[in-house]
Image: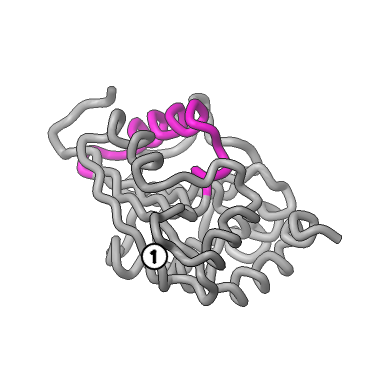
Amino acid sequence: MALADILAHPLLYMAYQGLVGGVRARRLCMERNLQPGPSLNVLDIGCGPGYGIRYFQNPAFYGYDVSESYIHWASAKYGDRATFTAREFTEAELSHVPPMDVVLLMGLLHHLDDHQSQQLMSLVYRALKPGGVAVTLDGCYVAGQSGIAKWFLDGDRGRFVRDEPGYLKLARPVFDRVESTIHHDYFRIPYSIAIMKCYRDATTSAK
């Protein structure tokens, strides 16, 4: 059975993410980049099995994923505290969610080409409240990274792993301010990631 087939099963996906450090990486990303307070409106696009809700205190949490099996699992586990939807987050969905304090795109952009990513980032900007922030996390090519790290990135299910400038060019034309950092120690395996914090300023209107 191919890895993609294995990861399609929520329990196996969670076991794999725990083993390689994906769960750890997302926890560190939340702790070090958000320090989230209570009762936030949170949108998790590409939410997988929905465990992003763990990092927030009593949020109004909305998760979207195209995998029906992931959404079924998330709804069974967290559905009493969140709303999960098995489809893409599109223009039509903007009217189905409140303005967001936080939008998460954890391991999503490297599955989308540039056009798809820029369209999504525009929707994310409009989904945010003025003063809100979107956080992305994706595998990233870095000059001088180890051969093993590059091997893991080359074998990723996502076909659009980029370098840091490649991710920034998706966000900077859309958001009022973008901060990016590179990390090599968030996962338990050699794996480089780029994290972007993408802000909608408190004084700006929707673009």
Front-most of 153 and 59?
A: 153
Residue visible at 30% across and 68% down in the picture: 32
Residue at image point 48% right, 66% down: 146
Please name the residue that numbered disc 1 is placed on.
56
State the SS at label 1: loop
Residue 89 higher or lower than 182, as above or below? above
Q: Is residue 100 left or right of residue 74?
A: left
Label 1 crowding class (10 Å Cα cut-off): few <14, some 14-19, many 20+? Answer: some
Residue 116 percent coordinates (x, y)? 52, 29
Q: Is residue 128 magenta?
A: yes
Q: Is residue 55 above or below residue 206?
A: below
Is most of the magenta stretch helix, strand or loop? helix
Amino acid carrying mark 1 in the image: Phe
Residue under the image location 54 percent in, 67 percent down: 22
Q: Is 116 in the magenta?
A: yes
What is the quadrant of the N terminus in the image? Answer: bottom right
* Left or right of 110, for residue 3: right
Indicate the position of residue 122 as horizontal and vertical percent values. Answer: 38, 29
Residue 92, percent from left and from top: 52, 25
The image quadrant that residue 131 belongs to is: top left
Residue at the image point whose x is 21% and y is 26% from the top: 205
Q: Nearer the viewer, residue 117 or 14?
A: 117
- Which segment is the magenta one? 108-131
Q: Is residue 95 visible?
A: no
Q: Residue furthest top?
A: 207
